[in-house]
Image (tube, rainbow, N blue to C red):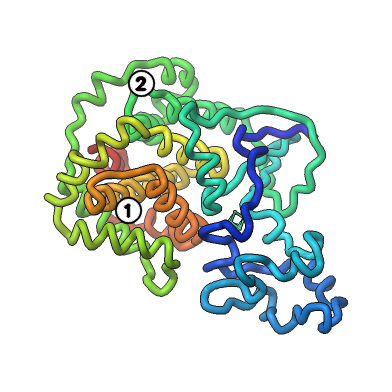
Amino acid sequence: MNVLLPEYYDHFKCIGEDCEDTCCAGWNISIDTETKKKYKSVPTNVIDLQSGIVKDSFKQHEGVCHFLHNNLCRIQLTLGESYLSNTCSTFPRQYKQVDDILELSASPACPEIARLALMNRDGISFQTDTRDVIAMGKMKLNATDEFYTLRALTIGVLQDRRYSISDRLIILTMYFTQKEVYSGDEQQFLNNDFSDVLKKIRPESENQFKLISELIHFLRDEKKDRIRYKECYDEMSTYLNGSFSNYEQAYHDFYKPFMEENEFILENYLVNYAFRNLDYKSLDQFYLMCVYFAVIKYHLIGLAGSRKGLDTDLVIKQIQSFVKRFEHHPATYTVIKHLHKKEFASLRGFVLILKN
Ligand code: SF4
C-alpha cells in the first residue's frame, strides 16, 4: 500500500506509565462491536471486563478509564495488545485514505506526539513509502485536483519563513476569502512578496483581546476541563485578569521575544493540523484552524506574562492540553457560527484576531 506520512510519525512509541496525560484520562473511550464481542468470552476470573463497561464505552473513575491502574492499562497487561479496542490501539494515529494513498498522521493531544511533531526546528517534512498498514477507523476522501492544489498552497504558505506565522495565516485568509481572484494562479501566489501589503495592516490589539476573550468564554465549559488544561487556563486568566494592558505588555515583553526564536513550534502545529484535518470543502474548516491558533496564542500570551517568559515545555503543555480539550470536541464549530453571526467571518475579522 502506498503511504504518505510526516517524518515524525515513525519515531512515535507510546511512553505508557511515564505519560503525563495518558489518553485514558478525560475522554469517553468507545468500544467497537468486534472488541465488545471478544470481551464477552473473557472469563471474569481472568479480568472482569463487564464491570468496567457501560453501554459501548469504558467506565471512567475520577476522570480516567476504569482499567487504568498506576498509569498502565490492565486489559493490555492481562490479555495483550490484541484485546485493545480500535480506539485504544489506534490513538494517537490517524489514517486518511486519499484516492489510492493512505495518509498517516497523529494528534498532538498525545504529549509524546506533541513533542515529536512540534519540536523539530527545521519544520515538518513528508515522505512517501510502501508498507502494510492495518488502518482502523480510516477516513476516506476522493480528492480533486483542487484538493492537491489547495493543500500544497496551504502548507507552502505555512512554511514560508519570510513572514511571521500570523502573517502567513493572513496571507492564506486573503487567498481563501478571495479565491475567485487568485484561483488558477496558486504558484504565482506562493512566489509573491506580500511584505508591503502586510506592513500596511495595523493591529487592532484591544479589539483582538476582547474578541478572543469572548470566543474563549463561548468555547469553555468548566465542567469538561481536565487538570492539565485547567492549570494553563487558570494561570493565564489569573494573570490577564480581563486587563488589555496586561495582555499587551505580556505580548511585547515576553511572548514576542520567545516566539522570534521559536515560532517553528506554532508553524509545526498548523502544518500538522492542516495535513490531518483540512479537506478544503468549506471555508469554515480553515477559519476554525485560525481560531484555534488565535486562542492558543492568547493562552500563551497570558502564560508568558504570568511566568515572565515562556519555555518549550510550557508551550507544549499548553498546546497539547488545548488540543485534547477542544480539537476533538464537535461543539467547537459553534464558535464559527458565532463569528458568522457577528459578521467577523471575513478577511477583516480574521486579520483582527491574527495580527499583533
Ligand atoms: S497519550 Fe500518547 S504517550 Fe500517553 S499513554 Fe496515550 S498514546 Fe501513550
Residue that carries the numbered disc 1 in the rendered image: 339
Q: Residue at x 44, y 15 (%)?
A: 188
Quadrant hosting ligand 1 = bottom right
Assess whether mark 1 and mark 2 are in contact (beta carbons under 8 angstroms).
no
Q: Reading the chain from its start, which is encountered first: label 2 or label 1?
A: 2
Q: Which residue is mark 2?
A: 162
- Vertical side of 149 occupied by 33: above or below: below
206 over 147 or under it: above or below: below
| Residue 102: % across, % down | 72, 38
Q: Amino acid at mark 2?
A: Arg
Which residue lies most toward the left here? 245
Inspect this view and state whether residue 174 appears.
Answer: no
Of circles 2 and 1, the one toward us is 2
Quadrant location, the N terminus: top right
**Which image quarter: residue 17?**
bottom right
Residue 145 picture location, percent across and down: 61, 28
Please name the residue shown 44% across and 42% down the image.
286
**Residue 275's x, y, as percent?**
56, 38
Query: In the image, 109: left or right of 210?
Result: right
Locate residue 208 relative to residue 127 in the image: left or right.
left
Disc 1 under 8 Å from ligand 1? The reply is: no
Mark 1 is surrounded, within 10 Å at the Cα level, by few (under 14), some (14 to 19) or many (20 or more) other residues, namely some
Residue drawn at x 46%, y 60% is 325
Task: Bin the neighbour count of mark 2 within 10 Å (Cα to Cα): few under 14, some 14-19, many 20 and up.
Answer: few
Tell me where residue 27 sits by quadrant.
bottom right
Q: Is residue 218 visible?
A: yes
Q: Quadrant of the C terminus?
A: top left
Q: Secondary structure at mark 1?
A: helix
Q: Is residue 207 above or below residue 201?
A: below
